[in-house]
Image (cartoon, rainbow, N blue to C red):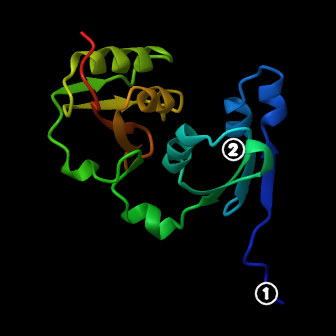
Amino acid sequence: MAASTNPPIRELDVRPILQAGGEPFQAIMDAVEALKPGESLKLFAPFRPVPLFSVMANRGFGASDRPLDGGDWEVIFTPVEVEQQETSLAFGSSPSAAHWPDPVEELDLCDLEPPEPMVRILETMEELRSGETLFALLAREPLFLFPELAKRGHEWAGNFDASGTAYRLLIRHGGKASS
């Protein structure tokens, strides 16, 4: 008898966490870490969690979402096929990153502990002009940085190097410099 081709979907409802005034990001990341290979995550939230789409794309998941009654949302994060992941240049907020200009700034932040890499990147982005790019090399995937970049209107693309030990991040300034 053949095994089922549809792995179970793990569910996480973050509405109670948010109603209690909590921050659900860590619970979401814990649920993602607990997923078995090929398993999807169904998330229930009181709003459409757009910044999370990029975070999950960087972790190899596609998203499908639908509104529920009362303004709530259901989002299913499904692992992208391995073949698709390997042919993709990078995951992030922008599929057009291959056509961006060369970086005007390059930062090697591998030796810094969080939150210093995020602080340095955001400070450097403040100095750039619209359309200019920054390249950063990091010791880990900067999950908390992605929502901050989105909030500021910046685009990014990133992935791990072939060894899996360094995260390469390209960021394009999406607005006017504030300095």
Going by the image, does 129 lie left or right of 120?
left
Q: Which mark is residue 2?
A: 1
What is the quadrant of the C terminus in the image?
top left
The residue lying toward the viewer, choosing from 73 and 146, is 73
Q: CA distance from mark 2 to mark 1?
A: 27 Å
- Callout 2, which amino acid? Glu
Residue 131 in the image: state x and y as whole percent. Answer: 20, 34
* Image x and y of residue 78, in percent: 63, 60
The picture places residue 135, in percent across and down from the top left corner, at 26, 32
Q: Mark 2 or mark 1: name the one nearer the start of the chain.
A: 1
Secondary structure at numbered mark 2: helix
* Amino acid at the residue labelled 1: Ala
- Any part of residue 35 in sight: no
Could you tell me residue 62's position as x and y percent? 55, 57
In the image, residue 120 above or below residue 78? above
Query: Residue at point 33% right, 14% down?
Result: 123
Q: Residue at x 73, y 43 (%)?
A: 71
Local crowd size for mark 2, using a 10 Å CA cut-off: few (<14), some (14–19), many (≥20): few
Q: Which mark is on residue 33?
A: 2
Q: Quadrant of the N terminus?
A: bottom right
- The residue that appears at 35% across and 39% down in the rendered structure is 156
Label 1, residues with CA under 10 Å away: few <14, some 14-19, many ≥20? few
Pick out the residue farthest to the bottom.
Answer: 1
Furthest residue to the top?
179
Tell me which corner region of the image, top left, top right, bottom left or bottom right, holds residue 152.
top left
Q: Secondary structure at mark 1?
A: loop
Comparing 30 with 148, the one in front is 148
Q: Is residue 98 above or below residue 174?
A: below
Direction from residue 172 to residue 50 in the image, left or right: right
Q: Relative to residue 107, is residue 60 drawn left or right?
A: right
Image point 36% across, 19% down: which residue?
122
